[in-house]
Every structure is written in C-alpha cells, then in structure tokens.
Amino acid sequence: MPYPEIHDLHMPVTYPQIYLDLAQERGITAEQVLHKAGLEPALFADPQGRIPLAHHFRLVTAIVELTQDPGIGFELGCRSPVTVHGSLGYALLCCATLEEATKLLQRFWELRAKGLGFSYQLQGEWNVISFYSKLPLSGQLRRLVFDFILTSVYRGIQFLAGPLEAPGEIWFDYPEPDYYSRFKHRLPPIRYNMAELQIRIPGPDLMHQRLPLANPEGLSLAIAQCEREYALLGEGCEDVLTRAKTLLNLSGDGYPSLDDLASQLNLSPRSLRRQLQAQGSSYRRLLEEARRRDAINLLTKPELEIQKIAELLGYTDPANFTRAFRQWTGKSPSQYRKLLTSTS
C-alpha cells in the first residue's frame, strides 16, 4: 500500500511542544533538542501553528536520544489533558455520551493526527477503537507514537466518563518493552503481541450514559470551530477510505458488497473503486482487514467453534480461514484463541 508523502503532512505544534516541555523537565533545553534535530526555533513560535510531520518525528527522536528514555510516549500519554487536542478537545468535553465523543473523534481525527488512522465499532460486548498507520513507521519511533496515542486517548475516555468509570484494556501489536514495568501501575491492563492496535471498553451501556460535563451549546460552538479549521486546511471531514472502513461491518447477512458500500456512500461502484485505488486501497483489501478485525473479536467467544467463525466471515472452507488467519497473525485460529485465554 503506498504511503502519503510524509513531507506533505502537517500536525499542530501543540504535540511537539509538550515533548519539548518534558525534555526541559529532564534538564535538557529546547535549544539542545532543536540543535540535535536540526530544526529552527521559529517553527514553534506560533502556538496555533502546524509543522511538517517529518519534523515532529525528528524532534521526538532527538528527545529520546538526549533523555535516553524510550518510554516518554507513555509518560506524556498519562499526563496529557483532553484540552491538548485544541478545539477538538473542547468539543469532546462537551459531548453528552462516550459514544458521541468517540464518533466525534473519528469524524475529526485527521485534524489532529494526519497520517494515522482511527476507527470505532461495537464488536459484540466490546467497544473497540482501532488505530493504524498510513506511514512507514517502524521500531522505536512507531512504539513511541502509539504508546502516546493509545494512552492519551484512553486517559481521555477515563476523564470524560468521570464517576461513571471506564474499565477496559489496551492492545499493542508489538512486544512488551522493558520500560513498561515503570508505567504498569498508571495504565489499564495491556496486552502485547496482539494482531491490532486497539482500545477496548466493555459493555455497550456505558457508551450511552450521560456524561457529567455535557454541554450542547458548547459542543455546537466547538464543532463549528473544528469545521472552520478543516476548511482552512482544505480538508474534507472524512475521506472515502475512512468512511468505507467504518461501514464495512459484519451482520447476519455477511459483509456489505462493493455495490452496497457504494450505495451507502452515495457513490457509484466505479467511483468508489477509483477513489479507494487513489488512496492505495481496494474493496478486497478492506474486506480482508474487516475479516481480520472480526475474526479476532469472534475468537474471544469460547462458545463459537472455529468452523462457525469461518462461516460467519464468509469462508466456505475452514482451511482457507485458517490459512488467511495465519497470514494475518502468524498463528492459527486455535493457537490465537489459546493466547487470548492465557492472557485474560
């Protein structure tokens, strides 16, 4: 899948600034960090400005090298308030329910995290927020980015829920790092070496309970500001790829066909196919992603036999499902189910 050109992507200066603030707490000046990263101070002069995403990655890499602390993603994720997300953060504070807040975050996600994907779905008894990268991130940088994102989003959910409480867990698709032990007491249950990057909140009822900070007037004003920011960036609120991912859900009749999906998006099948191709994807690729996502969810249900799961996902031959699942995760469905059981 081709990646967007990273030098064409920008992000709010807010996030690099909080990394700089942490470095200063550790006795490292902003000048030292910027010199190490080869960046000019003028990039951070406007608190409402945006910087190239590539510059952000250079900056955080420099901070990790100077602090010798690869766990700063967790540190900042644990301490970042919802308001760090600007007008979108204020909109989230005013939402009536967690479901409304999560859908709003999905709607405006790329306003704050261009190049990183986000989707929300109800999968059985779990509210699942999934993350993925559209960029060629790897190694330490990838861990740092997703340590921060998943931790900060989870802590935001906890804050919004207030006295309602929001139990849940975080899934990472990479091995447990050495620094995790330093943060374990500050984080929810975490599972490593999973097939997805996810935040999982149990129970659909929690998502519909009224939040203590709900404010319809404030929400309307904050959403209007988010839309103005999108207009200034020349962006649409949702691209076709993101919307197609959201709509490709498993039902009793299986998955929507290409024609069904196009109809829901008010597009012709040909136009949908062309737009997905322009974004480096296809209906078939999205279907495989959906099958992988739902296979993992269904394997958490011990009452479902693996053959039945294969049928639900549209595989007429269970061997084809096993082959596909092994390609996705490196394990057979039965091996993966044992892993889920042993880590629960």
Image: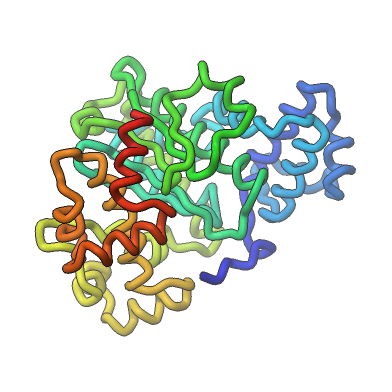
Q: Describe residue 300's horizontal placement relative to residue 225 as left or right.
A: left
Question: Of residues 126 and 265, which is closer to you in this image?
Answer: 126
Q: Residue at x 40, y 76 (%)?
A: 275
Q: Describe residue 151's horizontal placement relative to residue 215 as left or right.
A: right
Location of residue 102 by image quarter: top left
Q: Is residue 238 visible?
A: no
Q: Residue at x 53, y 39 (%)?
A: 149
Q: Residue furthest left?
A: 252
> Where does the image place residue 199, in percent across and percent down from the top left?
39, 37
Question: Of residues 111 and 22, which is closer to you in this image?
Answer: 22
> Where does the image place residue 74, in percent across and percent down from the top left?
59, 30
Q: Describe residue 192's horizontal placement relative to residue 272 as left or right.
A: right
> Where does the image place residue 270, in percent across and percent down from the top left?
31, 84
Q: How many marks?
A: 0
Q: Residue at x 89, y 43 (%)?
A: 35
- Colouring style: rainbow
Where, quadrant-wise, is the C terminus in this rendering? top left
